[in-house]
Amino acid sequence: MDFHDTPSEAAFREEVRAWLAEHLTGDFAALGSVGGPSDETGWETRVEWEKLLGRDRWVGLSWPAEYGGRGAGVPEQIIFNEEYARANAPARISFFGEGLFAPTLIQFGTEEQKRRFLPRIQAVEELWCQGFSEPNAGSDLANIQTRAVLDGDEWVISGQKVWTTLAHRADWIFVLCRTDPESRGHHGLSYLLCPMRQDGIEIRPLRQMTGSAEFNEVFFDGARTARDNVLGPVGQGWKVAMATLGFERGTAFLSSQLGFEREFADLLDLAHKTGAASDPVVRDELAARYVGLKVMRYNGMRMLTNLVQRGVAGPEASIGKLYWTTWHRAFGETALRVLGADALVVARAGGGTYEPGPQQQVFMASRAETIYAGSSEIQKNIIGERVLGLPREPRQGETS
């Protein structure tokens, strides 16, 4: 792959830089890149920023022009995310709507569904959350027990989802349900689109050790959605859900990976200031983290090349997900080593609560990254069986 910009790509890069220079000012610039797709820091300011992005069609950049997008290819998407990260722009809030649901909708949705939902995602009028994991169906997603039955022209949903990021902020949820009561495993599941603001849904926050509560339990007790709000064929939701997970494990985290470069630069600067950079063990770890950043970038480019060739993210996306989460977890450990004894101290905020610093937050948050969107063990199974062609691991009840 040639990593140099073509003339048209160079012109697009200049357009992105000029737009960011003009609009990334005031409160938007002051906020910086704090937060993340699952973080509520500076929420109201980030909402306004996202609306500005949507107005000028940076939300939905890759969508076809007939749905309000720019029809941008993968090189343009990479360029936008690179320049966005370099500009230290606010963390995006449309991760689940734009990054996960929209590409799945474009691939599987009806024309009516695309016309209904895409403009509202772009205008940031409707935010989305993801209803996949359950108490007994996390990595074993095929064990879904949440059920939906037809009642006239509506689906009635009953069950529980957990670790539902920003459910309390969302207007809609894409929820994987069992619509065939006699089915087992990945058969008989459907991918339903359900409004969140109704009496049949209860949201309970899950408080984390970082002090935040962006994750939630969501209880469905007779929640309703229109009969037509199913993405893909009824009973074939597994295929649709796997496409969503492909985007989550692959392209959706591209901007996060680019943000890691800024995290590394900040940590390197801190290591020089504190003198930790003179410690040979710390120097070795920092060098390893830097090399890992470069490997991550080339892995990402290889995955995106496959995406361009196939039109969908293949099982190779699991390589990227496994690599970046493992790298970021190790990076969090290096960050605490750079802090030294200060890593054990948490400052008291003005309200009387204790708030971890940025390096401490990275350490704690990164511990979960090897679990969500499919644990590292699941990613290894996918890579072994579907990329390398190794024998399938025995499932429960089978003998090896």
Image (cartoon, rainbow, N blue to C red):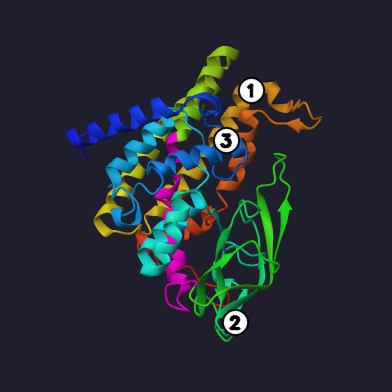
Of the residues under marks 3 and 2, which one precedes in the sequence?
Answer: 3
Q: Which residue is mark 2?
A: 149
**Are dots 1 and 2 in contact, CB under 8 Å?**
no
Instruction: Give the residue drawn at x 52%, y 31%.
Output: 33
Cα–Cα gap, marks 1 and 2 = 54 Å
Which mark is drawn over residue 288? none
Q: Which residue is mark 3?
A: 45
SS at mark 3?
helix
Residue interval drawn in magenta: 229-258
Task: Give the amino acid at mark 1.
Answer: Leu
Instruction: Give the residue drawn at x 43%, y 77%.
Output: 233
Task: Give the amino acid at mark 2.
Answer: Val
Instruction: Give the residue drawn at x 65%, y 61%.
Output: 197
Q: Which mark's residue is nearer the viewer, 3 or 1? A: 3
Residue 236 coordinates in the image, percent (x, y): 45, 76
Which mark is drawn over residue 339? 1
